[in-house]
Structure formats: structure tokens, C-alpha cells
Image: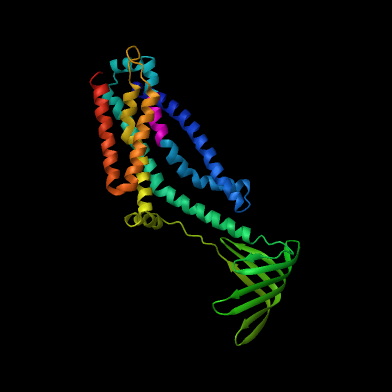
Amino acid sequence: MDRVSRYVLSNFFQTFLSLFFTLFFLASVIFFIKISHLTSLFSITFGDLGEAYLYLLPQIIVYTLPITFFIAVAMAVFKMSKENETIVLFALTLSPHKLARIFFMLSLGTSLFLLLNAVVFIPISKQLNKNFIAYKKMESKINIKATEFGQKFEDWNVFINGIEKGEYQNIVLYNQNKAKKEERFIIAKSAHIDKNGSIIGINLEKGRLFDFKDTGIDEINYDVMKLHYKPNVKEVKSDRVVNYWMLAKQDKTRAKDLAINILISFFPLATFLFGLSFGIVNTRHEKPNIYLHLFWVVLVYYLLMFKVATTVPLVGTAILIVGFHLASALFFNEKVLKRY
């Protein structure tokens, strides 16, 4: 890579990083507000808050990175144009064709990363987030307090007479199966919570179990009894990601999500020539409103994206990406290639 190309890339990355961190911070604040509603479901620590935020990172990236890249392309080149650097660069070794090739490779790499993030990381992060919420709800369910009625462990009603050194004293559990017309009643002298991975149990010690049936009452004396509760936690595997998106064939909502993720991912590749076209100007003869132009490109693309995703998601996705890229190429040819 020659010195001129490195200079262009240096200007681009300076602009890109400043924009990206600004938008990323604003998006993070919005998602932190979204996470805060979890406090109404269960108590969370600062570490839990950080874990929930990590699971939302792929979504934050897919919302911020495409637009940041597009704006950074236009603003970096526009900054050089205002200082007449683009004219000097074109007079040396850098032609508009070469400039376009440089940003084509950057936009292609960005789009492929976004596609991997949207198609693979987002489904995985969503499942991890669901597992996290399910586990925290499970923990909140076993936060049993002494001398309070109406507490439950899974489908067992629980009453505890007291807690001593983290151990429950004189515990009573009641369960009713209306379908089988059965009732179970357990008493224990002591009990404690046992956590093993995603499974949480209550270890009951020295008690009796009463099983009420139509045929009679069964009584069992025990030294140790274990009751286990496992939340609805799914394993995260690669085949689950494939199956997740295969539902797009039958599920309109999943097809819409897939189309939106793909279209957002290819936004940098489809629009980078628009960004170059807006950025390459002769400030002596032009006074372009570059911000308005950028706004209109983003607005039109995203409006068409949602329209395609809700009407013809599978076929319309490819048409919109190719069509927008061809439109940007024609615009770049008319505005830049024919003049420089």
C-alpha cells in the first residue's frame, strides 16, 4: 500500500473511531435503560448488569456500525475536500477508481463482519440472554424468607419457621395435583439450598412425607430428601442457529428479522459510493449540504428495508442490495468519474 492510500485510510479511521464511539455510547445508554426493567423482575448485582449488557452487544453493533461507517466515509473525504487535499491526491497517484477500490474492500469487510454478527452472534446472544433471565428468575423464586406465607419453590408451597446460619429450620412443603386428585405434604427439621450449575435444589433433612390419595394415606420417614428445580435453559449450539433461521421459510416474523439483519449488514457495501460522491467536492464552486444528503440516503434505504422485510423478505432483500449499489455506482460515475 502506497503512502497516499495510507494517508486516506488514516483520515478515515480517525473520523470513523470518533463517530463510532459517540454513537456506541448513546446506543449503550438506551440499551442500559432497556436492561433496567429487569430490576422489576428480580434483584441484580452490578456484575449481572454487565453480563446482561454483554448479551446485547451484538444488537448494539448492528445498529451503530453500518451508519457510522457510511457517515465516516463521507465525512473523512469531505474533510479532505474542504482542504483541497482530494485535488492534490488525484493529481498524484490516487485516482477516483483507486479511491473507490480502497473503500470497496473496507465496506466489504465491514459488511461480512456485520453479516456474521447478525446471523450467528445475535441468535446466540438472544438465547444466552433468555437463559440468563430464566436463571435469575429461578434464583428469585428460591429466595425464601422465614414466617411468610405464599412462597413457592417450583410447584411446592413453602413455609419456613426460621433461618439459622443460612439453614432453614422447621420447613413445611405442600403440593396439590388436581388432575390426579393427589396431595403431598412434607415436613422437615432442617433444609438448605444446593446449587449445581443451572439446577437448584432443596436438601431436606430428618422429616416425613405424607401422600394423600383416594386409596389412603402413605407416610414415609426419611433422613435426607432432595427436591430439584431446573429452569427453561437451552444449550447454545451451531445447529440451533441454523434451525433458528430455517424457520424463516414458514414464519413471517423470522423471515422479516432475517431480511432486516441481512439488509443492515450490507448497508455499508450498498452505500459507500454515495458517501464518496457526497464527500468529493470542489468547495470553491460547490456548497453541498452533505448532512442532508447523508440523512436522505439513510432514510430511503431504511424505509425500503422495512417495506421489503414485511412484504417480500426473501426475494426483495437481494433486489434492494443490488439495486441500491447500482444506483450508488451510477451516481458516483456521474458526479465524480466524469469530472475527475
Q: Nearer the viewer, residue 53 or 178?
A: 178
Q: Quadrant of residue 214?
A: bottom right
Please name the residue shown 67% across and 83% down the image.
Answer: 219
Look at the image and tell me in which quarter the C terminus lies: top left
- Number of numbered discs overlaid on the protein picture: 0
Please name the residue shown 33% across and 33% down the image.
Answer: 271
Spot the residue most to the top.
284
Q: Position of residue 329 (x, y in %)?
A: 26, 30
- Residue 9 visible in the picture: no
Please name the residue shown 26% across and 42% down the image.
Answer: 319
- Residue 224 visible in the picture: yes
The verdict on residue 71 being magenta is yes
Would you say the magenta stretch is mainly helix, strand or loop?
A: helix
Range covered by the magenta-colored residues: 66-75
- The answer to whether 213 is drawn above or below residue 172 in the figure is below
Q: Quadrant of residue 93?
A: top left
- The answer to whether 95 is drawn above or below residue 298 in the figure is above
Q: Position of residue 177 (x, y in %)?
A: 58, 75
